[in-house]
Amino acid sequence: MRSTKAIGAVERLKTRSGNANYAAISMPGGYFYLIERSPEGAKKLSEPLPMDDFVAFVNACEPARPHKVSKLDVAMEEQISRSGRAKPGTSD
């Protein structure tokens, strides 16, 4: 059974959320569920799901994956903001 895909999704969730307490629990038949560990005990965050559904669930968990911004996007935003201030006759 290849659980690398499920474990990788949880590792990405840990990275983007900054919470290292998430864990994937593997069940017989290729099912997984997500838990969050705490001093009070483990909190179950999902029902047992097949691997692909589990990965989709974990990827949809907040916070969302950050979108990459290219240098061109940054330059375009700067140009738009500069052009908005440079228009004569506009009031703030």
Image (spheres, helix red, strand yellow):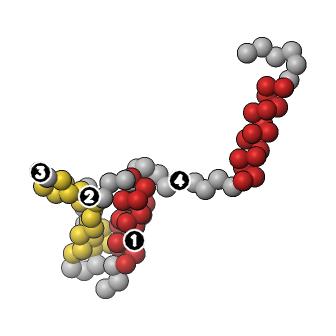
Count of numbered tags: 4
Q: Earlier in the sequence, mark 3 or mark 4?
A: 3
Q: What residue would you read off at disc 1?
A: 8
- Residue at the outermost bottom position: 1
Q: Earlier in the sequence, mark 2 or mark 1?
A: 1
Q: Nearer the viewer, residue 52 or 9?
A: 9
Give the percent coordinates (x, y) of residue 76.
77, 44
Label 1–label 3 contact, CB within 8 A? no
Q: What residue would you read off at disc 4?
A: 66
Give the percent coordinates (x, y) of residue 52.
40, 71
Q: What residue would you read off at disc 3?
A: 40
Q: What residue would you read off at disc 2?
A: 21
Secondary structure under badge 3? Answer: loop
Measured along the vertical axis of the image, is residue 1 above or below residue 34? Answer: below
- Identity of the amino acid at label 3? Glu
* Separation (CA) of disc 2 from disc 4: 20 Å
Q: Is residue 46 visible?
A: no
Q: Nearer the viewer, mark 2 or mark 1?
A: 2
Q: Residues within 10 Å of mark 2 (few under 14, many from 20)?
A: few
- Identity of the amino acid at label 4? Pro
- Residue at the outermost left position: 40
Residue at image position (16%, 57%) is 42
Q: Residues within 10 Å of mark 3 (few under 14, many from 20)?
A: few
Label 2–label 1 contact, CB within 8 A? no
Label 2–label 4 contact, CB within 8 A? no
